[in-house]
Amino acid sequence: MTIAFLINQTHKEEQNCTTSILAFEALSRGHTVWYIGIGDFFMSSDKTVWAYTRRITPETAVKNIDAMTYPQSASR
């Protein structure tokens, strides 16, 4: 299953936040997690809405919440 978490600011997400705990638990159960920040949405010239996201898959082998919440990359 793929689960998206919409959060206020991805770069300020901390490991003790409920969202981080839920996301880490989902990841540890084999789900793919997407982090989306409110400020990461934008509209392209053709009026399509996009968002910069952080996708974390079970294959990423994240060992703790702190490693998961640090924004390492963005994808469109």
Image: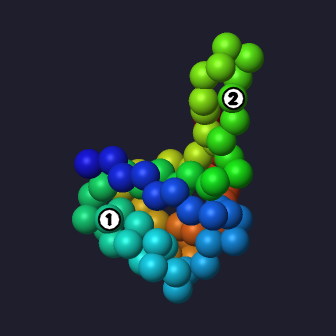
- Give the left or right position of residue 20, taking residue 37 as reference: left
Badge 1 crowding class, 10 Å Cα cut-off, few under 14, some 14 to 19, many 20 or more, is some
Query: Please, what secondary structure does the residue beneath circle 1 have?
Result: helix
Q: Which mark is residue 26?
A: 1
State the SS at label 2.
Answer: strand
53 and 44: which is toward the camera:
44
Where's residue 51, x and y in %? 61, 39
Name the amino acid, label 1: Ala
Q: Label 2 belongs to which residue?
A: 43
Name the residue rendered at 52%, 85% in the picture.
16
Q: What amino acid type is highlighted by mark number 2?
A: Met
Task: Give the residue furthest to the top.
Answer: 46
In this orientation, does residue 33 appear?
yes
Q: Position of residue 49 (x, y in %)?
A: 60, 30
Residue 34 percent coordinates (x, y): 47, 51
Q: Is residue 27 left or right of residue 63?
A: left
Closest to the observer, 12 or 44:
44
